[in-house]
Amino acid sequence: MRIALVLACLSLVIVGTMAASTRAHGDEGPVTPPDRLVESYLPPGDDRGGDPVRGRGWTYDSAVTATAYAAHGRLDDAGALLDAMQALQREDGALESSYDLRSGEGAGPLRSGTQAWVGLAALEWRARTCSGRHDRLIAGLTRWLLAHRMAGTGLVTGGPDVSWAST
């Protein structure tokens, strides 16, 4: 029974991802504020060295947290993080490396690992819920990752300023 449910969900992911990739972005709904992301560092208030990271959320941290929430049945919490990331997703399908939690301004190089972790989080949530709520997020990330494949290798470039590749 569980296998049939997983297969049904995976079929919906494939169909939903294909449909989402062809859909216009005009029906996105309300934008979720970036303050829903995980704050990555909490330096002491009197630590001036912590100013550059204070109030920032690294996308990877939010993705791993959303994955853990979904895996442990905290689907509303995982869904809220994925909603925030979907709202911040760029037109090319990628997410910035980190975001200012007050303004939503993104920064940092685009890394394939960060994109993949967000995709894994969205797929874990989808497998648990069988909902297509984050199919646009999945489709955009998939499109971005596939566009960054290294010819003939099946690998994806790690980022714009590194020589390594992701599998």
Image (cartoon, rainbow, N blue to C red):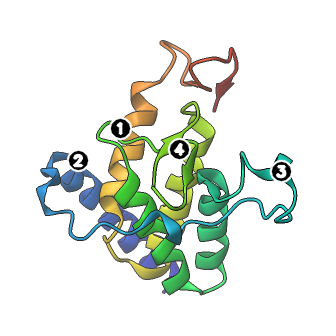
Q: What amino acid is at disc 1?
A: Arg
Q: Residues within 10 Å of mark 2 (few under 14, many from 20)?
A: some
Q: CA distance from mark 3 to mark 2?
A: 44 Å
Numbered disc 1: secondary structure: helix
- The front one of 85 and 149 is 85
Labels 3 and 1: the sequence-earlier one: 3
Give the image location of residue 56, x and y in percent. Answer: 63, 55
Measured as percent of width and height from the top left, residue 80 is found at: 46, 76
Which residue is at 66% across, 61% downward? 64
Image-based side of 130 in relation to 37, left or right: left
Residue pointed to by mark 2: 21
Q: Nearer the viewer, residue 160 or 4?
A: 160
| Residue that numbered label 3 is attached to | 48
N-terminal-most mark, 3 or 2: 2
Q: Secondary structure at mark 2?
A: helix
Towards the viewer: 161 or 46: 46
Badges 2 and 1: C-beta atoms under 8 Å apart?
Answer: yes
Q: Residue 143 bears which disc, if any?
A: 1
Where residue 6 appears, x then y in whole percent?
A: 46, 73
Count the labels in the image. Answer: 4
Name the residue beneath numbered marker 4: 115
Q: CA distance from mark 4 to mark 2?
A: 16 Å
- Residue 30, percent from left and from top: 25, 71
Residue positioned 57% across, 30% down in the render: 109
Place residue 72 in its image quadrant: bottom right
